[in-house]
Image (cartoon, helix red, strand yellow):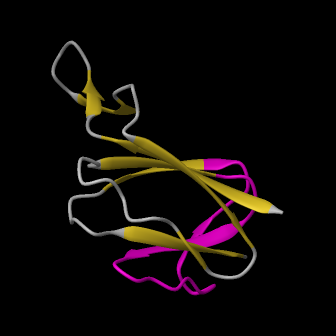
Amino acid sequence: MASLYITEFQASGNAESGAQLQVGVQPAVAMQKLTFTTSTQSAVFDERTRFIRLHADADCHVVFGTDPTATTNHMPMLADSTEYFGVVQSGLRLAVIAA
């Protein structure tokens, strides 16, 4: 069965120059693993979460919202890909569906 791994971070890292890097500051705030075929929702992201890392082990589509339902018209992710997103609105979660 397909899985989407969600790692929640409070902040992203900075280089010595001060430039923001696309890496989460450890330790992570929370982690979730969603197993999916049909649209499956995550838990609401922790209130401290500002940055998330998604890793898909199968082709899928994701959408963010307060009560999202994913369809194959939403943002695609390829198998074995990793993406990073900023999360600033409280009460957000995501939904994922198999491609």
Locate residue 12: give its quadrant. top left
Which residue is at the front of the view, 16 or 86? 86
Q: Give x and y (percent) for residue 63.
A: 47, 75
Dividing the image into 4 quarters, which one contains the N terminus? bottom right
Count of numbered marks: 0
Q: Answer with left or right where residue 33 lies relative to residue 59.
A: left
- Residue 9 in the image, given as x and y percentages of width and height: 35, 40
**Left or right: 1, with 54 as reference point:** right
Quarter occupied by residue 87? bottom left
Residue farthest right in this picture: 1
* Residue 70: in magenta span: yes
Q: Is residue 83 magenta?
A: no
Q: Nearer the viewer, residue 9 or 55?
A: 9
In this rendering, is residue 6 above or below 44? above
The quadrant of the picture occupied by the C terminus is: bottom right
Above or below, comparing residue 32 to residue 68 in the picture: above
Q: Is residue 65 above or below residue 18?
A: below
User: Viewer-proximal residue, 40 or 85?
Assistant: 40
Viewer-proximal residue among 75 and 97: 97
> What residue lies at 36% left-to-right and 58% top-to-bottom?
45
Q: Position of residue 28 (x, y in %)?
A: 40, 34
- Residue 34 sits in quarter: bottom right
Q: Residue furthest top?
A: 16
Residue occupying image coordinates x 36% and y 39%: 29
Q: Residue at x 26, y 36 (%)?
A: 11
Residue depicted at x 71% and y 48%: 80
Magenta residues, start to end: 56-81
The x, y position of residue 21, in whole percent, is 31, 31
